[in-house]
């Protein structure tokens, strides 16, 4: 078995199927551009770590859209399951057949950096599980060295997801560590916060996201 892998869990950037909570603030076309930029920047960040990457992709959309964004030799695995929890568990469970430790991350995280991933794997050296929160009460990263489907049997898209997940982890006697907190971009308020962060700190290396965010804000200013 190999040592470590990153599961990049994402939807395919398909018109009308991606970042719908940003509509009508953004057009469907801009939602696709924004998600594509997120995927590019996250991928460019995590590939510098030198760990195997597995793209876990949604069944809706043209897979070639994803293949045009990342390197050609990346492994792609279609998401399987009835809900997001089951899909994440299946992606992790399958990967643990080949790797000792796996970390799964989402794709709404343009500010994600390799330190977030490196911290997660360092926690897995000592703990059964690692989980990293988002500011809205969810989590953007979960990693394991042994599959546990019960962790994912909660209701998602709520502000209590992170705490409910911790309750399940603790009730099963698993050791765990918390990773860095991050901003995931779901709605207009998240987008505005992202814009302010990027404007304040020009050293953040997410050039594709920065470009489309600036383009959108110029349009917004022009419409005022």
Image (tube, rainbow, N blue to C red):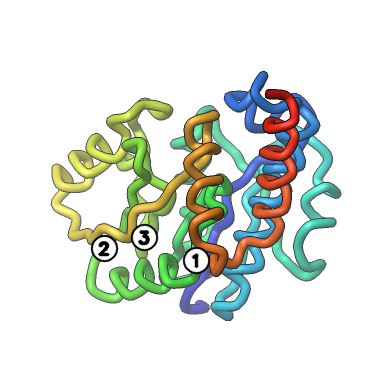
Tell me the distance, in whole angstroms, between the alpha carbons under discs 2 and 1: 23 Å
Q: Position of residue 62 (x, y in %)?
A: 83, 40
Give the quarter of the image for residue 161.
top left
Please, which residue is most extreme toward the top here? 24
Q: Which residue is mark 3?
A: 144
For the residues labelled 1 and 3, say whether their Cβ atoms are less than 8 Å apart.
no
Identified at 36% across, 65% down, the residue is 145
Identified at 39% across, 59% down, the residue is 143
For the residues labelled 2 and 3, say whether their Cβ atoms are less than 8 Å apart.
yes
Q: Tell which tag, 1 or 3, sits nearer the viewer.
A: 1
Q: Residues within 10 Å of mark 1 (few under 14, many from 20)?
A: many
Q: Position of residue 132 (x, y in %)?
A: 34, 54
Identified at 34% across, 53% down, the residue is 181
Q: Which residue is mark 2?
A: 128
Tell me the distance, in whole angstroms, between the alpha carbons under discs 2 and 3: 6 Å
**Nearer to me, 144 or 35:** 35
Q: Which is more N-terminal, label 3 or label 1?
A: 1
Q: Position of residue 170 (x, y in %)?
A: 15, 47
Give the quarter of the image for residue 217.
top right
Give the quarter of the image for residue 163.
top left
Regarding mark 2 in the picture, which secondary structure is present there?
loop
Q: Position of residue 105 (x, y in %)?
A: 50, 54
Tell me the distance, in whole angstroms, between the alpha carbons under discs 1 and 3: 20 Å
Regarding mark 1 in the picture, which secondary structure is present there?
loop
Q: Which residue is mark 1?
A: 113
**Nearer to me, 27 or 131:** 27
Q: Which is more N-terminal, label 1 or label 2?
A: 1
Residue 78's disc is none
Relative height, residue 57 to residue 3 (above, below): above
**Looking at the figure, which quarter contains the C terminus?**
top right
Q: Which is more N-terminal, label 3 or label 2?
A: 2
Q: Residues within 10 Å of mark 3 (few under 14, many from 20)?
A: many
């Amino acid at each position: 078995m190999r040592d470590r892998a990153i599961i990049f869990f994402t939807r395919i950037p398909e018109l009308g199927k991606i970042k719908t909570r940003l509509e009508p603030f953004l057009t469907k076309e801009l939602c696709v551009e924004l998600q594509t930029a997120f995927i590019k920047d996250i991928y460019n960040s995590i590939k510098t770590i030198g760990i195997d990457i597995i793209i876990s992709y949604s069944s809706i959309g043209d897979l070639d859209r994803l293949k045009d964004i990342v390197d050609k030799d990346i492994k792609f695995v279609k998401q399987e399951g009835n809900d997001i929890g089951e899909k994440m568990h299946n992606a992790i469970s399958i990967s643990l057949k080949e790797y000792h430790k796996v970390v799964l991350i989402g794709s709404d995280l343009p500010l994600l950096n390799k330190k977030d991933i490196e911290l997660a794997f360092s926690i897995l050296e000592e703990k059964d599980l690692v989980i990293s929160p988002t500011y809205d009460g969810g989590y953007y990263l979960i990693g394991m060295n042994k599959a546990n489907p019960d962790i994912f049997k909660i209701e998602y898209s709520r502000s209590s997801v992170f705490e409910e997940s911790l309750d399940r982890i603790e009730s099963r006697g698993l050791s765990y560590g918390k990773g860095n907190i991050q901003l995931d971009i779901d709605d207009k308020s998240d987008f505005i916060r992202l814009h302010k962060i990027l404007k304040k700190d020009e050293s953040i290396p997410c050039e594709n996201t920065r470009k489309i965010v600036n383009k959108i804000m110029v349009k917004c200013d022009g419409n005022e």
